[in-house]
């Protein structure tokens, strides 16, 4: 399944001033910020890597589901349906949650 080009373009534009590497994975396009997976454009959703502490709270929001692979739920990885990213405020909310956690992860490296 191919990723959503429009969504990928929106993510790319939002991350333009950051050190980003794009990687195709499982038919999706992952955006690695500071060497860490941060966001992922899928065919009909955006995956956000957020603080696992916020996982359960954010799952309660409309259009959200946990990332499950191999029958295992990954805490801190949430898919947000495209329809819940249509306006700038909603898109920005998820973008900022992912970037906040990315900053936290990268500050632990040293």
Image: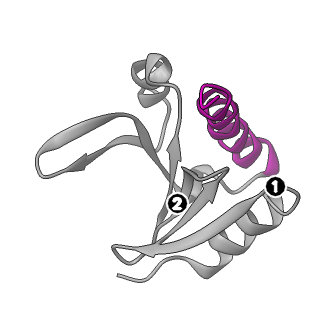
The colour mode here is one colour
Q: Is residue 64 left or right of residue 46?
A: left
99 to 32, vertically: above or below: above
Q: Which residue is mark 2?
A: 40
Residue 109 picture quarter: top right
Instruction: Tell me where the magenta segment starts and ends, as one range.
Output: 88-110
**Quadrant where the C terminus is found in the figure:** top right
Which residue has dot 1 on it?
18
Left or right: 24 as drawn, with respect to 85? left
Q: Does 26 appear above or below 55?
A: below
Q: Tell me which residue sits at (69%, 57%) in the image.
A: 86
> Residue at 76% of width from left, 58% of height from top?
19
In this rendered view, identify the residue nearer to me: 26 or 109. Answer: 109
Callout 1 touching callout 2 (CB < 8 Å): no
Coordinates of residue 5 in the picture (x, y in percent): 61, 81
Image x and y of residue 21, in percent: 64, 67
Mark 2: secondary structure = strand
Q: Residues within 10 Å of mark 2 (few under 14, many from 20)?
A: many
Image vertical order of residue 94 relative to residue 33, above or below: above
Label 1, label 2: how many angstroms apart (C-alpha)?
Answer: 16 Å
Prevalent SS, magenta region: helix
Counting from the top left corner in percent of width and height, residue 75 is at: 34, 30
Element at label 1 = loop
Residue in view at x 60 percent, y 62 percent: 31
Quarter the N terminus occupies? bottom left
Q: Is residue 89 magenta?
A: yes
Where residue 94 sits in the image (x, y, percent)? Answer: 65, 40
5 sits left or right of 88 in the view:
left
As drawn, which residue projects farthest toward the right?
17
Q: Nearer the viewer, mark 1 or mark 2?
A: 1
């Amino acid at each position: 399944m191919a990723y959503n080009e429009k969504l990928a373009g929106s993510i790319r534009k939002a991350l333009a001033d950051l050190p980003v590497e794009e990687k195709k994975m499982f038919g999706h396009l992952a955006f690695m910020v500071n060497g860490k997976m941060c966001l992922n454009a899928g065919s009909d959703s955006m995956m956000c890597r957020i603080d696992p502490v916020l996982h359960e709270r954010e799952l309660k929001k409309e259009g959200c589901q946990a990332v499950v692979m191999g029958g295992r739920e990954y805490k801190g990885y949430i898919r947000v349906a495209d329809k819940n990213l249509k306006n700038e405020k909603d898109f920005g909310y998820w973008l900022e949650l992912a970037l906040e956690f990315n900053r936290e992860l990268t500050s632990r490296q040293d």
